[in-house]
Amino acid sequence: VSVASALIGAIGGALLAYAIVTGNPNGALRRFVTAACGVLAQFGGVTLAFAFIATIGTAGIVYLFLKDHGLDLYPNRVWLYTLPGVTLVYSYFQIPLMVLVFLPALDGIKPQWREATESLGGSGWHYWRYVAGPLLLPAFTGATLLLFANSFSAYATVAALINQGGIVTPIQISNALTSEVGLHSAALASTLAFGMVVIVTGVMVGYSLLQNRTAKWLQ
């Protein structure tokens, strides 16, 4: 779930951020989109899960409307409460977060670099392959790592969607601490939590190193 939502958020957010950069830097549209991303990036937890359940859940208004018009979102099974559904919900706040994180790197790309590439006979492909691409790759990779850490540590959203089983590590930790059938194990919970700390620490160290490298190149 963390890897899938991070990749979806990174690609979708990067495309949206690029669309914002190509517009008017002082325009109302950019201010509106960045403000909306700032709000949506923080919109998670039980509130977000309930919003999806009330919208496309089996009793949701959009689901019932589409079903009445011959389109069933769940012909075989209710995927909203499975891993694909959790990935979709996570992407809702991953994409706005990617926009906020990746936008400064895109702003650091100077138009003169494209003009220099074209003056030397290069095409758009050469510009992205040899100029903009290598400069933006560390920022893109670092932002993707940040999205992974963000989704890897999320708990409330997935707990509200899936209340049975332990398909993600935070829920496994919760089950190990609060089992009602005598299966609780503080040692297992501590081990899983320590593993999460190690993974998130490694990811954030990588993100910090990549961000420093990006800042040096795009000064």
Image (cartoon, helix red, strand yellow):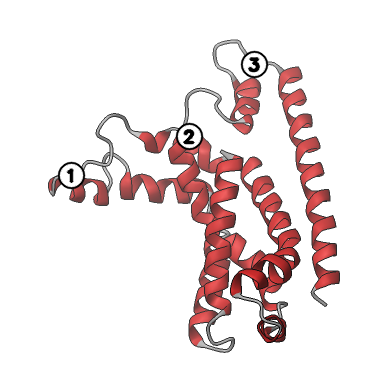
N-terminal-most mark, 1 or 3: 1
Labels 2, 3: front one: 2
Q: Is residue 211 above or below residue 34?
A: above
Within-10-Å neighbours for mark 1: few <14, some 14–19, many 20+ = some
Q: Residue 134 carries which label?
A: none
What amino acid type should be assigned to the residue bearing mark 1? Lys
Q: Residue at x 47, y 47 (%)?
A: 89
Residue of label 1: 67
Residue of label 3: 184
Q: Which residue is drawn at 71% across and 83% down?
A: 120
Q: Position of residue 93 (x, y in %)?
A: 53, 55
Q: Where is residue 96 in the image (x, y as percent from the top left)?
A: 55, 62
Q: What element carries label 1?
A: helix
| Spatial separation of the CA atoms under disc 1 and disc 2 | 23 Å
Q: Which residue is drawn at 65% across and 27% down?
A: 173
| Spatial separation of the CA atoms under disc 2 and disc 3 | 24 Å
- Residue 82: image quadrant is top left
